[in-house]
Image (spheres, rainbow, N blue to C red):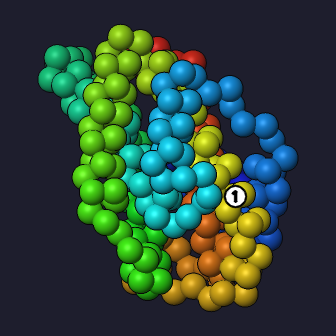
Amino acid sequence: MAGEETTSPAASGRLPRLTHEELRRAQSRTLEEPRRRYGTAARILFTLLDAVYGKPRTLSKFKVLELVARVPYQAWEQIAFIAITHVHTRTGMARRIHERVAASRAQQDNEMFHLLVIEELIARAGLPQPQIKFFWLPQAVAFVYYQLSWLLFVVRPSWSYRLNADFEDHAEHEYMTMVAEHPEWESEPFGSEFDDDFGHFASLADVFRQIGHDERVHKLESEALMKEPRFR
């Protein structure tokens, strides 16, 4: 289906922007598909987030998700640079590792714009953001998640990729479900100072559908990497 191809961030530098109709189809596809069978670490994380931030899907809760979402890509990028220092004389392998770095950076940037768009919406709505709950605690969770992602990759890369695939699958389904819960967003126009960076969308519903589709692309990327050796 044109526009819904899951282009690798490493190949494109930017994830595909879908049309309104493509976004609606992407949402339907996500809601019809079962969630992944999450591993223990992912289930613990999701349970913790529900316990602290509640089960309802809110902008503030998604802000926390996005603060954590970038962490695995940062861990993989750091490991890749360490690997390059050890294999730099083998230029072919060093280049292939750097391609992984480029992919991780593109995914980090995409997650960053998710965070900035949500932060902008929170500011416009004037939602309270207590520092302990929405800054310090997410930073602590992100720190632990970074260490876990790093350790799992060192021991067995597929474990780290699986954890990220679980996280991204959860985010994909949560975003698409949130849109279904807010039919009023279909007629709510969207404008942002990040339009030129993230994309131009006709409605708030389409913004969150696009974010959900982005998470799907990240998930599929991690699922593909689960099947590959550490570095080729």
Front residue of 225 and 10: 225
Residue type at tag 1: Met
Residue 82 x %, y %: 19, 25
Camera sees residue 232: no
- The structure residue drawn at horizontal position 62% and vertical position 27%, both measured from the top left corner, is 38
Q: Indicate the position of residue 100 as horizontal and vertical percent values.
A: 38, 34
Q: Quadrant of residue 170?
A: top right
Point out the image quarter for the N terminus. bottom right
Foreground residue among 199 and 1? 199
Tell me the residue that label 1 is attached to. Answer: 176
Residue at the outermost top position: 155
Tell me where residue 4 sits by quadrant. bottom right
Residue 205 coordinates in the image, percent (x, y): 67, 74
Find numbered disc 1 in the image and state the secondary structure of the residue it sits on: helix
Q: Neighbour class for label 1 at 10 Å: few (<14), some, many (≥20)?
A: many
Q: Quadrant of the C terminus?
A: top left
Left or right for 183, reference 112: right
Horizontal side, residue 204 vs residue 1: left or right: left
Q: Is residue 69 above or below residue 229?
A: below
Vertical order, 232 against 140 (above or below): above
Closest to the observer: 128 or 87? 128
